[in-house]
Amino acid sequence: MIIISSKTPKLKDIIKRHLQKVAYIRKEIPNPLADFGIEFKFPTKKDFTMVIAKPKDKGEIQLTHTIKFGEEHLKRYNTLKSLEQNQLLYDLSQLVHSKECNFTILKFDNNERIIGIANKFILSGKPIEINKLFKFINKAFCVSALVLNHIKFRLSANGYTPESSSNLSPSYFT
């Protein structure tokens, strides 16, 4: 059993070794404001890239994932009325928040829709079992997959219907 804290030396190496077992590490991201940053991809059919980073002088690890609407879904989204577009985004944010993650709209215009999912893992001064961090990483992956499925379902070939939002409560995915 490996125990970590905010002061654990080689925390980056421990996380990197775990990621090499479950994901493909794309690159390390240099940032003067972070102790480390690693971009990685889970082995799925789609390009499912996430970034894990430890900001300097903070007792936390941040994990982020961005989701870009596909061309087909973007076209369908743009055909929705403004109220329906807002309802879809609200439903997505509620789904993410129900799983105790954060939801952000990163870029939104008629040509591109990018949303972000982020979460923080707090490294307290007390020792924490490393498996809790790995469960945190897996949870973030699952929440991102739920959002992708929600977008695909709501903007499917059948088209958007307001009733579909009530059928896709967060409990639907648990």
Image (spheres, grey):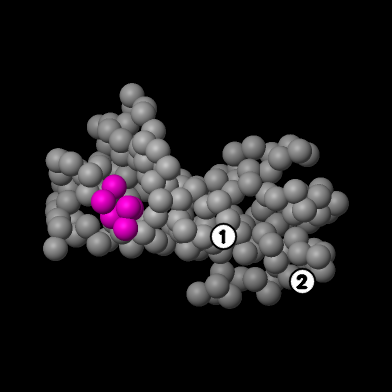
Badge 2 or badge 1: first in the primary sequence: 1
- Residue 45, labelled with which disc? 1
- Name the residue located 29 percent from the left edge and 47 percent from the top edge: 16
- In magenta segment, residue 110: no
- Name the residue located 77 percent from the left edge and 53 percent from the top edge: 72
- Name the residue located 81 percent from the left edge and 54 percent from the top edge: 76
Disc 2 to disc 1, how far (Cα)?
Answer: 30 Å
Amino acid type at mark 1: Lys
Query: Magenta region: which residues?
Result: 16-21
Q: Position of residue 155 (x, y in %)?
A: 75, 60
User: Helix, strand, or loop for circle 2?
Assistant: helix
Q: Position of residue 37 (x, y in %)?
A: 35, 37
Farthest residue toward the top?
32
Is 171 on the left-hand or right-hand side of 12? right
- Which of the 4 image quadrants contains residue 160? bottom right
Q: Residues within 10 Å of mark 2 (few under 14, many from 20)?
A: few
Residue bearing mark 2? 163
Q: Position of residue 124 (x, y in %)?
A: 21, 48
User: Helix, strand, or loop for circle 1?
Assistant: loop
Whether residue 58 can be seen here: yes
